Image (cartoon, rainbow, N blue to C red):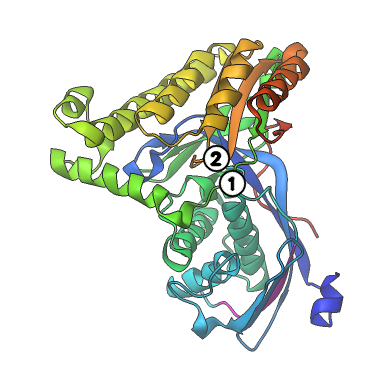
Amino acid sequence: MRFAELFGREPDGRWAAPGRVNLIGEHVDYAQGLCLPFALAQRTVVEVAARTDGRLRLRSLSETDGWEGTLDEVGPGSPAGWAGYVAGVLWALREAGHEVGGIDLLVTDTVPLGAGLSSSAALESAAALAVDDLFGLGLGGSPTGRGTLVAASQRAENEVVGAATGGMDQAASMLSTAGHALLLDTRDNSTRQVPFAPRDVGLGLLVIDTRVRHSHADGQYGARRASVEKAAATLGLPSLRDASLADVESLEGEAQRRARHVVTEIARVRETVELLDAGRLADIGPLLDASHASLAGDYEVSCAELDLACAAAREAGAAGARMTGGGFGGSAIALVPLDRADAVADAVRAAFADAGYREPEIRPAEPSEGATRLS
């Protein structure tokens, strides 16, 4: 169904924002850690028209339910479902003092939902850039201004939707550039573009969607975040960014395991960036493997399908593989020689078939541009 058929007029424009893959630095963005995501070619596209009456009419071609209401009805917990990601962005911008009005919005294309590629941040970022353009906020033209849109998108997810995510996903979707990964320091939200062009050195990245679906708002993600914050408080630190391995060893049980992942993962990000800056992209594979082992063992956010995807990819010749995203399903990534990409993909599919799992969806990943206006 077209925009005009739904809303009785043509849209003012079309905006798109990408999903993301986190190369390394998982579950540390809410511990003031370092992350290294990059934007995907897969994008969420929205068609939007401004309104003058403060009403929101939100529809999606991939969802049976829409939402209609006023800006005054938007707030923590309302609206529920996917519409909260869009309405929440307008609410957060208005809360921050920006003058925004109502919109008609249709989501026409989406990043694969629940695949660990941050479909929610892609939707928030596309909506945020559209609202910025339509209401003349003047934020989308500079990294600093885009940072304000990132903050609004994160607040929408945290406070309106109720998912206790950090800001990595929104930053990657809004700020990434092609041929680079985005080094994000979540302590001060500073960013740096790090060269990351696997094809230039005969390598590629495969995204392996296990088709096991997850939801960040189901409590597991929030529980991990709470455990990290509790561990920091036990150590008397503002965050685990300030912890050492010796500090971690003073903890016990689950708190120790969770904290150990965070501290070692931040160190792995630093090592990865050093290698990429030195032109040694081909040497990051062992760090990807170590990241997965930590996420599966200490942080316990993997699942049987993710573990199998990584193991099968390595056995077939991948230089390294790890789960990516929040976990409990979703996707893994594998760094592979280009001439082995098909063989690795076939080996993963065969392993899933032997285990009786659904066939995974496997696609190449290219470091791509962030959110943009299409028309």
Number of other residues with Cα within 10 Å of mark 1, as a class: few under 14, some 14 to 19, many 20 or more: some
Instruction: Please name the residue shown 49% across and 29% down the image.
Output: 24
Number of other residues with Cα within 10 Å of mark 2, as a class: few under 14, some 14 to 19, many 20 or more: many
Instruction: Please name the residue shown 77% across and 19% down the image.
Output: 342
Residue 275 as seen in the image, left or right of residue 300: right
Task: Using the rendered image of the protein, determine whether residue 102 is visible from the camera's viewpoint.
Answer: no
Query: In x, y percent, where is residue 164?
Result: 40, 55
Magenta-span inclusion, residue 137: no
Please say if 243 is above or below 279.
below
Q: Quadrant of the C terminus?
A: bottom right
Magenta-span inclusion, residue 104: yes
Give the magenta range. 100-107
Report the disc number at residue 67. none
| Secondary structure type for disc 1 | loop
* Mark 2 or 1, nearer chain start: 1
Choose between 257 and 183: the one closer to the eye: 257
Query: In x, y percent, where is residue 85?
Result: 56, 64
| Secondary structure type for disc 2 | loop
Choose between 226 and 37: the one closer to the eye: 226
| Residue holding disc 2 | 329
Task: Using the rendered image of the protein, determine whether residue 85 is visible from the camera's viewpoint.
Answer: yes
Residue 8, by quadrant, is bottom right
Residue 64, by quadrant, is bottom right
Instruction: Please name the residue shown 49% across and 14% down the image.
Output: 286
Whether the residues at callouts 2 and 1 have beta carbons within 8 Å, the answer is yes
| Residue holding disc 1 | 213
Which amino acid type corresponds to the residue marked 1 in the rendered image?
Arg
| SS assignment for the magenta stretch, majority | strand
